[in-house]
Amino acid sequence: GAVVSQHPSWVICKSGTSVKIECRSLDFQATTMFWYRQFPKQSLMLMATSNEGSKATYEQGVEKDKFLINHASLTLSTLTVTSAHPEDSSFYICSARGGTSGPDTQYFGPGTRLTVL
Amino acid sequence: SQQGEEDPQALSIQEGENATMNCSYKTSINNLQWYRQNSGRGLVHLILIRSNEREKHSGRLRVTLDTSKKSSSLLITASRAADTASYFCATDAWDDKIIFGKGTRLHILP
């Protein structure tokens, strides 16, 4: 089956630093990838939709200059949290559409837990 | 804004009993999916039901979809301790996005 990986699985950083999270589709080409954020005991909130070779589309209320998304290839999308602050601490999950199961199927990565001190 | 709303928000039942969770949504959909998430972990895809389907089964799971009422239900039969998790419905509304509901926290009591 299709696999999506994320790296790192967890990261702790100081306030003010930038953190990059990678999302890879390991065995299929993903034309579209999605980034979600999940706070403790809450649901996943869609942050942005990322299409290969074009600018990401951000959901309302998500700062594009704060959360930089780059979808450089059909297998890799990156999310950079710039000048991270403690309120950015969250669980970040990516997903990708594609694979042999068809465009309806979306595969989720295992998530990256970000803690900003 | 979120598409789906799960009901109940939390559910505690005895092991062996059936658990039913409901999901309501607001707009027309292509399909609806149910996911499970153990505490602090990633999502596990459980089942996908298309807008032209009314019921789907997978092992101990039964999902129904009523597009006229914009609602879905997830039934877990003969619950086990390992079923303790959060369950989310997620809707795919023809715009490539999957939007998650708030989730139901299910706790199976021994």
Image (cartoon, coloured by chain):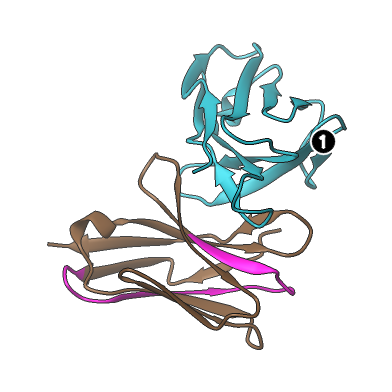
**Nearest the eye: B28 or A26:** A26
Q: Quadrant of residue A27?
A: top right
- Tell me what residue is drawn at x 52 percent, y 30 percent: A5
Image spot of residue B38 (x, y percent):
36, 47
Q: Colour of chain B?
A: brown
Colour of chain A in the rendered structure image:
cyan
Q: Is residue A1 a member of the stretch shown in magenta? A: no
Which residue ends up furthest to the bottom in the rendered image?
Answer: B68
Q: Is residue B24 magenta?
A: yes
Q: Amino acid at mark 1?
A: Ala
Q: The residue tagged with tag 1: helix, strand or loop?
A: loop
Coordinates of residue B14 in the picture (x, y in percent):
17, 70
Q: Is residue A70 left or right of residue A92?
A: right
In the rendered structure, which segment of residues is drawn in magenta? Answer: B14-34
Q: How far from the left and from the top, in percent, is residue A15?
A: 60, 14
- Residue beneath label 1, please? A56
Quadrant where the image shows the N terminus of chain B: bottom right
Judged left or right of residue A32, residue B39 is left
